[in-house]
Image (cartoon, rainbow, N blue to C red):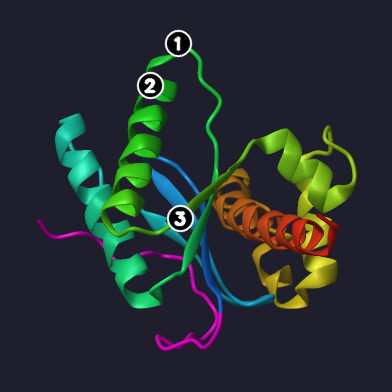
Amino acid sequence: MKTKRNITSNTPSTSSLPGRRLVSIDPGMNKIGLASFDGNQLIDYVVKVIPSAPLVRERLLSLEEVLGRYLDEKKPNEIALERTTFSSSTQNGLLVLAYYKMLAMARRRRIPVHEYVPISIRKTVCGNGHATKRDVVKVLISKYPELRIFTGTDRRWKERHYFNLFDAVAVGLTHIKRSKQHATKPN
């Protein structure tokens, strides 16, 4: 099955990274936000578009192919994943399937997964669990100025598209901050 290349640009990356390599994921059935960190340094960020397909099974296979290629390229030691919130809507049902597909892929590759709920991510990044997506974007741009090029669009769909990228970076930053907090706590 052929897939389309993603549309969103990213920073240059290398495939052989020393130290701790983290891939953080904002899951989705249509678009996946991905970010890659080497230690504390953000090295790559992208939105991958999952090709449309009439059957859910085909969509999941496309998702597996797209995410599998990214994981094979980055060779992470760990994955940080935004945990989906569950509801009864059909669209959310597809997201839940995508979420569990990502967990299964990590398990097969024996990559530890660290999950974070959205309110926890916003609290860690912004200091406020009820911060808006735009608040999160502002904080991330102050830390990673190179992300500024993905803001200031006059099109609502572009803004929503890039929120996937910012969400992935926020998940990774949350994991890095939480890991540091756990490492500095006395036993």
The residue under label 2 is: 93
Q: Main secondary structure of the magenta part?
A: loop
Disc assigned to residue 112: 3
In the image, residue 97 sits, relative to residue 93, either above or below, namely below
Q: Position of residue 87 (x, y in %)?
A: 50, 15
Of residues 84 and 49, the one nearer the viewer is 84
C-alpha gap between disc 1 and disc 2: 7 Å
Badge count: 3
Q: Position of residue 179 (x, y in %)?
A: 71, 60
Residue at the (44%, 51%) spot, across then down: 32
Left or right: 49, with 132 as reference point: left
Quadrant (top left, top right, bottom left, bottom right) of the C terminus: bottom right
Mark 1: few, some, or many residues within 10 Å (few <14, many ≥20)? few
Tell me the amino acid under the disc marked 2: Gly
Tell me the amino acid under the disc marked 1: Ser
Q: Quadrant of residue 141?
A: bottom right
Q: Which residues are magenta?
A: 1-19
